[in-house]
Amino acid sequence: MLIKGHEVKGSVLDSETRCTHYHKEIDRIAIKFYCCQTYFPCFTCHEEHGCGNPQVWPKDQFDQKGVLCGGCGNKLTINEYLQCNSCCPYCGTDFNPGCNLHKHLYFEV
């Protein structure tokens, strides 16, 4: 699905990157998976529709744009995302703070 000019794959439900697995109001990011350089709303979407070889972003790559805000369409670096306190630094849209529980599935911790 094309979301704000960016392709997001998976079980996407709407234009703010919500998917069948995570679809609360605050579920509005997509993460570019390091392994396939493709945006997915969540790790389950990647498991179902991804490359089959999940790899996390290494710490030395955290300056790369790897997170898409479903609110405004801006791309955040991984550092920006990890330090944003669950709020887009560009548009102020709230993100799901519970995503921090899954960061080990996307980023080297």
Image (cartoon, rainbow, N blue to C red):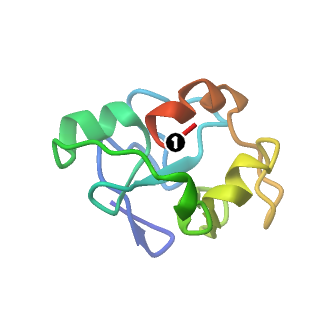
Q: Quadrant of the C terminus?
A: top right
Q: Residues within 10 Å of mark 1 (few under 14, many from 20)?
A: some
Identify the residue at image location x=42%, y=38%. 42
Answer with left or right where residue 92 lies relative to residue 23: right
| Residue at mark 1 | 108
Identify the residue at image location x=73%, y=59%. 80
Amino acid found under the numbered disc labelled 1: Glu
- 72 or 85, which lies in front? 85
Identify the residue at image location x=51%, y=32%. 104
Answer with left or right where residue 49 lies relative to residue 25: left
- 60 or 72, which lies in front? 60
Identify the residue at image location x=76%, y=42%. 86
Q: Quadrant of the N terminus?
A: bottom left
Name of the residue lying farthest toward the bottom: 5
Residue 37, image x, y percentages: 33, 63
Does dot 1 land on a helix, a strand or a loop?
A: loop
Q: Does 36 sit above or below residue 29? A: below
Name of the residue lying farthest toward the front: 60
Residue 25, image x, y percentages: 65, 35
Q: Does 74 sit above or below residue 87? A: below
Residue 65, image x, y percentages: 56, 68
Name of the residue lying farthest toward the left: 52
